[in-house]
Image (cartoon, rainbow, N blue to C red):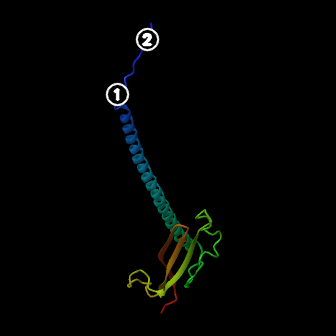
Amino acid sequence: MTKTSFHHIPRGGTRQRGAVLAITMVLLVVIALLAAYAAANVNTDLRMVRNLQESVRSLNSAEAGTSALIKAIFDTPGLLNGTSNADPLAGVNPNPLANVTNRGDDAIDLNVVNTVREGSCPRTAAGSSARVIVCDHYRIESEHTSDFARTKVDEGVFAEVIGRNSP
């Protein structure tokens, strides 16, 4: 005895398999478009993060320049001598800004500008030394420049000077 098997193929079966293929292709195209959109967004986000990181690093470096110069003013007598100075840390050894950036591709530019010579000091006019002590006012300019960011920080300081304007 032999067994005979019959397979019944419905008439619309081949058409239905083609519809499934078309729907699958449409879904794959939609998923590919979503993946391309997500990749573009990730690339934009990475650029934004890099720019933000560089701007924060630049701000920190510029502020390090002003902080180093203020520390050098306290440690080095005569650093503020009543004149403007384009390289105020030239004679300071070791240079406090030598290892601030650790990259070598960028620099911190420091400048001291004497804005007011022998001006009034921030104290009451009725003080006993108000006419004996005068102040030189300075603006410390610290600028950091890198490939992706540039930051400039200005800070005002004053130095008391005894005896220049005494009566």
Whole-percent x and y of residue 110?
56, 75
As drawn, the label of residue 70 is none
Q: Are marks 2 and 1 in contact (CB under 8 Å)?
A: no
> Which amino acid, by three-letter code, is at mark 2?
Lys
Instruction: Indicate the secondary structure of the residue bearing disc 2.
Output: loop
Instruction: Indicate the secondary structure of the residue bearing disc 1.
Output: loop
Image quadrant of residue 74?
A: bottom right
The reply, left or right, for residue 132 in relation to residue 109 is: left
Which of the two labelled residues, at mark 2 and mark 1, occupies the earlier sequence position? 2
Image quadrant of residue 84?
A: bottom right
Whole-percent x and y of residue 114?
51, 84
Whole-percent x and y of residue 85?
58, 81
> Which amino acid, by three-letter code, is at mark 1?
Pro
Identify the residue at image location x=52%, y=89%. Answer: 164
Question: Is 46 rendered above or below residue 149?
Answer: above
Relative to the observer, which residue lies in front, 9 or 129? Answer: 9
Mark 1 closeness class: few <14, some 14–19, many ≥20 residues within 10 Å: few
Relative to the observer, which residue lies in front, 62 or 53? Answer: 53
Identify the residue at image location x=52%, y=71%. Answer: 66
Q: How many marks?
A: 2
Mark 2 closeness class: few <14, some 14–19, many ≥20 residues within 10 Å: few
Identify the residue at image location x=38%, y=82%. Answer: 124
Relative to the observer, which residue lies in front, 68 or 55? Answer: 55
As drawn, the label of residue 10 is 1
The reply, left or right, for residue 42 in relation to residue 86 is: left
**What is the C-alpha distance between the residues marked 2 and 1?**
22 Å
Residue designated by label 2: 3
Question: Is 35 rendered above or below residue 146?
Answer: above
